[in-house]
């Protein structure tokens, strides 16, 4: 009986392992691509508001001209999104988007001040009610980390290129 349960468990986990090599990274890439594409298109079609927050950017981004920062942020989001969709240069795209997200979190989403962890944690929100709103940037960072460390998964151009190179 116990041997049969182990055999069933191995079949189930084996199937999950096979599917897990393809789908989770693909789903992460697609949802992140959607989010960064939307942000990039909004910037592309909008007006540059970075000059109003340039002083909030961490060094060295705070000394870059706001127009250059706007251009870089816009195209990092758009090109990063396309790379994520196809799973091409995924680790580079993920690292680039991580840096962009950290800068955005510090400049826009982080609270101006806080006196305790519980007060800081009030900023773990979507809307800013005076405590920041770093929930989405934090979630994006956490979603980008597996792509940075593990790559794009089997459903990617990166995987196909690796097979050709090996």
Image: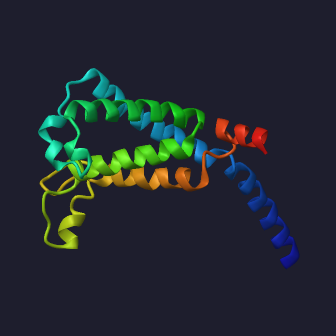
Q: Is residue 113 above or below residue 106?
A: below
Q: Nearer the viewer, residue 74 or 124?
A: 74
Q: Is residue 85 above or below residue 22?
A: above
Q: Nearer the viewer, residue 98 or 15?
A: 98
> Which of the 4 image quarters holds residue 9?
bottom right
> Which of the 4 image quarters holds residue 164?
top right
Q: Is residue 135 above or below residue 4?
A: above
Quadrant in which the N terminus is drawn: bottom right
Quadrant in which the C terminus is drawn: top right
Quick check: 161 left or right of 32? right
Across the whole image, how many numbered discs are drawn on residues?
Answer: 0
Residue 1 at least partly seen? no
Q: Position of residue 59 (x, y in %)?
A: 24, 52
Q: Position of residue 145 (x, y in %)?
A: 49, 55
Which residue appears at 17% of the width and 67% of the height?
A: 119
Q: Position of residue 16 (x, y in %)?
A: 71, 55
Which residue appears at 87% of the width and 76% of the height?
A: 3
Residue furthest out toward the bottom: 2
Residue furthest out toward the top: 45
Q: Is residue 94 above or below residue 74?
A: below
Quick check: 42 left or right of 90? left
């Amino acid at each position: 009986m116990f041997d049969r349960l182990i055999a069933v468990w191995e079949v189930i986990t084996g199937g999950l392992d096979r599917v897990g090599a393809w789908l989770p990274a693909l789903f992460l890439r697609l949802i992140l691509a959607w989010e960064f594409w939307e942000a990039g298109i909004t910037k592309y079609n909008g007006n540059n508001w970075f000059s109003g927050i340039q002083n909030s950017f961490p060094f060295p981004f705070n000394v870059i001209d706001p127009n250059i920062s706007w251009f870089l942020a816009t195209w990092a989001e758009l090109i990063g999104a396309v790379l994520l969709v196809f799973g091409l240069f995924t680790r580079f795209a993920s690292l680039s988007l991580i840096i962009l997200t950290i800068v955005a979190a510090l400049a826009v989403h982080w609270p101006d001040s806080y006196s305790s962890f519980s007060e800081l944690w009030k900023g773990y929100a979507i809307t800013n009610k005076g405590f920041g709103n770093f929930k989405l940037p934090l979630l994006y960072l956490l979603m980008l980390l597996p792509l940075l460390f593990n790559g794009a998964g089997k459903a990617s151009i990166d995987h196909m290129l690796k097979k050709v190179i090996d």
